[in-house]
Amino acid sequence: MKSNKQSPDTLHNNCSTLPLSNFIEIVLHGDLRWLVRGGNPSLNELSAAWDKILEEYVSLVKTNKSDSIFELYKKIKYTEWQIVFVDKCIYALKILYDEEIADLLNQRGFGIVQHSEDWQAYLKSLYAIEMSAKILVVLLNQYNAEYKLVDKEQGAPDNASAEDQRFRYEKELAMLSKYQGQRIIKEIITVMEYAAIINNYLEEQKSNKKTIKDG
């Protein structure tokens, strides 16, 4: 009698084999066919495999996990607000120094605006804050992945279009590639390898932020 059970080789069911590009496509569009490696897995098998991968991914990336959906929703919205706020502050300060805007930006904890008669030195301090604040993009992507896991039926509270979300991932990839010192090729790197890079980045940024705060 022929078994209906699929071979493990027919689909991705863990982060160690799934390419990052496939993971991103599923997050953006919900198309579980990106999990298929061969054969014809059923929708139930694909759904079970995706749930397992998403749970594994959320556990791999070392952020402070939320205790409730509402708490996670607030984190997502607050992080979205911070991204817009920091971007607007930096944009304004690149045009003209303003003490009130600089103080508001300094309170975010991503660095201190160094007001100087030397315009290049001043801009350098803004670029440093801009780079440090890019951690918010990584955190936002992670919070949305966590939300998809804890509330699959409702989905992530992300009103951004698929194009906007894709741009956010590309922005994250570009920033982490710069951090790595080499381009991250999403079609080659696995989700597990990418999670390790995110963890290293988050740890370094956490250490830098503590240094800024203590200083």
Image (cartoon, rainbow, N blue to C red):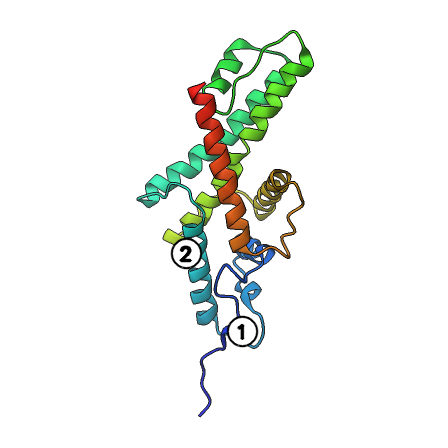
Q: Nearer the viewer, residue 57 or 86?
A: 57
Which residue is rendered at x = 60% and y = 16% of the image? Answer: 93
Work out whether residue 134 or residue 197 is closer to the camera in this orientation and state it.
197
From the image, tell me which residue sits under label 1: 9
Q: Amino acid at mark 1?
A: Asp
The crowd level at tag 1 (other Cα within 10 Å; few <14, some 14-19, many 20+) is few
Quarter of image, res 4: bottom left
Across and down, in percent, residue 25 comes to 57, 56
Amino acid under label 2? Answer: Glu
Residue 159 in view here = no
Q: Quadrant of the C terminus?
A: top left
Q: Position of residue 109 (x, y in %)?
A: 46, 24
| Residue 189 sits in quarter | bottom right
Q: In which quarter of the view is residue 124 placed?
A: top right
Residue highlighted by disc 2: 55
Given the current orientation, which residue lies at the most extreme bottom position? Answer: 1
Tell me if residue 73 comes above or below residue 84 in the rendering.
Answer: below
Residue 177 percent coordinates (x, y): 63, 42
In three-dimensional space, the C-alpha distance between marks 2 and 1, rounded to whole angstroms, equals: 20 Å
**Against 199, is 192 above or below?**
below
| Label 1 SS | helix
* Label 2 or label 1, whichever comes before in sequence order: 1
